[in-house]
Amino acid sequence: MSLETAPSSLRERQIANLKRMLHLNVRSDIDLVSSTNEEELVWKVLVLDQRSTAIVSSVLRVNDLLEYGITMHSLITQKRAALPDVPVIYFVEPSAENIARIITDLENEHYADYYVNFTSSLSRSLLEEFAKKVALSGKAGRIKQVFDQYLDFVVTEPNLFSLDLPNVYSQFNNPKTTESDITSIADRIANGLFAAVLTMGSVPIIRSNRGGPAELISQRLDQKLRDHVINTRQGASTSLQHSTADRMVLVLLDRNIDLASMFAHSWIYQCMVSDVFKLDRNTIEIRKTLAGDKTEIKRLDIDPKDFFWNDNASLPFPDAVENVESELSKYTKEAREITAKTGYSSIKEIDPSDQRDTLHIQEAIKALPELTQRKNIIDMHMTVLTELIKELDSKNLDAFFEVEQNVGNPATQKRFLELLKAQTKSDNHEDKLRTYIMLTLTSDLPKSFCDECEKALEELHCDLTPLKYIKQVKELTKLSSMNLSEAYLNTESSASSGNKGALFSNLSSKLMGLTEGSSKLSEGFGSLISGLKNLLPEKKNLPVTNIVESIMSPANANQESLKMTDDYLYFDPNLTRGSHSKPPKRSSYNEAMVFIVGGCNYLEYSNLQDWCNRVNETAGISGAPQKLVCYGSTEIVTAEKFLKECSELGKQL
């Protein structure tokens, strides 16, 4: 695939690599289901394990698999029916257990031909063991391919990825973690990052903060990339011939560089869905408590082609409500125009098997699948937004958001004390603790105020062990004196609490009576949403975004950020000889991968993409190159889960 036609986002690149694998590791740009395609479609079976299932299911659907001839997919651990006339593609982790199962299938002639793909690099010892067992089986001729795919990471958004390694933050920061455990975790992270870097198609410059896990991982990754450069130099890899501006920069950071964003409340649609419900691998899980302590769980899948999510996920939720209203009106108008011409009273009544050969009937039948899909997507997001606002109302979450946006305002402390003692419809003690941690991390609070807050939290039976740990981290890193934490300071209150509360209450009352899919969601929101939008704070860069800006666009960065990043470690894996001891000169980069060791969240991802979009808008006017930033971590972590990790660490103090 040439550089000119290479997909831009990480998700597009990963999909291209997966599709190439499903097409038996040859060209992936052929339309196998087209009637004009001269190449014969080969029907295949796909065998996965738990790890590869997560990788594939996040970016491909059943129809995508069918397009590349996958008629059946199953787990390698399940009992599978023998299909001796059908070729099989294995896509699994490189483990002894998986190799043993593949050999068993081979010996039993379970399938016709075997195309074996590993999610990451197969070690030399396992490769030798695999080759030996294949030879002993006497069926080596059936093994057609063995590939290391380097796809051992999960992509959930166009430029958001995770290594799906849980509890890395608490493992690295726990004094009981052994040196061998730390080495093992660092190697796994370096391997995952190596895969993501290769997928992006460029050997990057590596920048890393000093003195923590990020430094250890950057050293290991640098060595892996150096070895890769040496091994591929004979092939004159195009990625090695780029100028500095064309090369990607990998920014490796420890989670402690900014803990506040892990606890923050947000009004970004995607962030709120992740925070209030559960957002895991593009599935939204909404839990509702029913009578008799029963729980109803509703799971809603976000298709990668979900137009509403793609356009609105990174917007404030008032915008999302306004836009779903607009989409519903647009759909209703189009459906009414189509049905008016056909004689049907509604879209639902249109019969796809209608044989009447009239132009309007045929046009309606042709438009029906797209209209139905659009309506399903609109209905789903109406449901999510309705349930979201019910939760916000019952927990008074807008008040926490307002406090966190006005940390520097003297009246904020008084408002927060009132908030701690306020009664709500649903339990929100964890939200109260999160906001108090935010205040603790981003400002120096009077001891009397702290004592009063902590007493109130104890009376709410909050677990304060996370707070114990957070205070120690703040003392060690002196976060309160860092200029980067100014991202959270705002001495100008955006609106009075009373006005905001009235608007929010009004919005909530409009939604409380709605039924799922009700068209009434479009009624009466104009002034309410406009009012809420006016109360949203001015966009500011979070600390991680400030760091990325100072490395990618030093000419536009503030001096404090530049002073910090100038001290970051610098590795150039292309320099296979010599040392990295020379301090680097400041350079500009058009493409970056940002990786947080110890967990990330949708808030930082959204903030980075906002910055990138603003820069690209300016660049579009001036004709400068567009910038791309992808963001990843060991795990995408919710505030609730990160609190639990900090609680475990607090118990060690």
Image: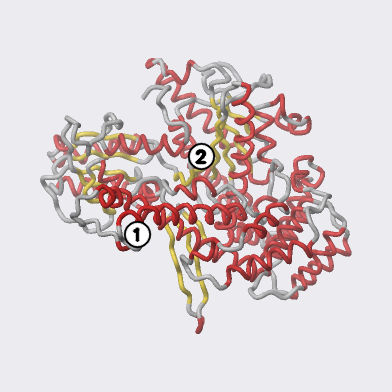
Q: Is residue 249 left or right of residue 493?
A: left
Residue type, label 1:
Ile
Quarter holding the C terminus?
Answer: bottom right
Most extreme residue toward the bottom is 292
Quarter of the view holding residue 18? top left
Give residue 347's mark.
Answer: 1
Does residue 551 appear to the left or right of 342 in the view shown?
right
Q: Nearer the viewer, mark 2 or mark 1?
A: 1
In the rendered structure, find residue 10 and report the number of the disc placed on it. Answer: none
Dot 1: element: helix
Residue 649, by quadrant, is bottom right
Amino acid type, residue under disc 2 in the picture: Asn
Report the residue marked by disc 2. 159
Residue drawn at 39 percent across, 50 percent down: 54
Vertical order, 622 against 546 (above or below): above
Asked where in the image residue 122 lies, by quadrant, the reply is top left
Q: Nearer the viewer, residue 531 or 397?
A: 531
Tell which circle, 2 or 1, labels the residue nearer the N-terminal end.
2
Q: Which residue occupies the foreground of this view, 181 or 460?
A: 460
Q: Is residue 635 above or below residue 458?
A: above
